[in-house]
Amino acid sequence: MGHEMVIVKNVDKQGRLVLPKEWRKKYAGKGVVVLRVEGERIIIEPFKLPDLTEFFDSVEVDLKSDLSNWKSVKGELLEVR
């Protein structure tokens, strides 16, 4: 686990608070975070897009169609078997 920091913050009438600048710069550079509510706790984490490249080449399909003919491949993949 990284550096731990405890800060007491005021929450305004609309429920807003300001996240520490250093944390925002390091973890929320794109301005998007994930809020997870666990009972009385709210966990704020950086939003990270999943790495979809781990799924590349992970599905094998037995096709009769020529891969250069996408229309034929698409038709074969969508046909009900």
Image (tube, grey):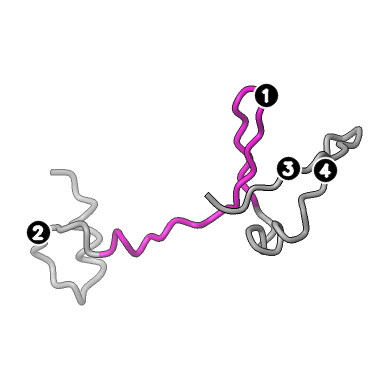
Q: In the image, what residue occupies the spot 11% across and 61% down?
A: 63
Instruction: Count neighbours of disc 4 (C-alpha within 10 A) and say few if under 14, some if 14 to 19, many if 20 or more.
Output: few
Q: What residue is pinned by disc 4? A: 17
Circle 3 SS class: loop
Q: Does label 1 or label 3 sit earlier along the sequence?
A: 3
Q: What residue is pinned by disc 3? A: 6
The amino acid type of the residue labelled 1 equals: Glu
Marks 2 and 4, how far apart at CA: 54 Å
Instruction: Count neighbours of disc 3 (C-alpha within 10 A) and say few if under 14, some if 14 to 19, many if 20 or more.
Output: few
65 relative position to 24: left or right? left
Q: Nearer the viewer, residue 52 or 22?
A: 22
Q: Which residues are magenta?
A: 33-56
Q: x, y (%) of residue 67?
A: 18, 72
> Could you say which quadrant of the image residue 15 lies in?
top right
Q: x, y (%) of residue 31?
A: 70, 58
Marks 4 and 3, how far apart at CA: 14 Å
For the view shown, which residue lies furthest in the right direction? 13
Mark 2 near mark 3, Cβ–Cβ under 8 Å? no
Q: Residue 12 shows which numbered tag?
A: none
Marks 4 and 1, how far apart at CA: 16 Å
18 relative position to 60: left or right? right
Q: What residue is pinned by disc 2? A: 62
Q: Does label 2 or label 4 sit earlier along the sequence?
A: 4
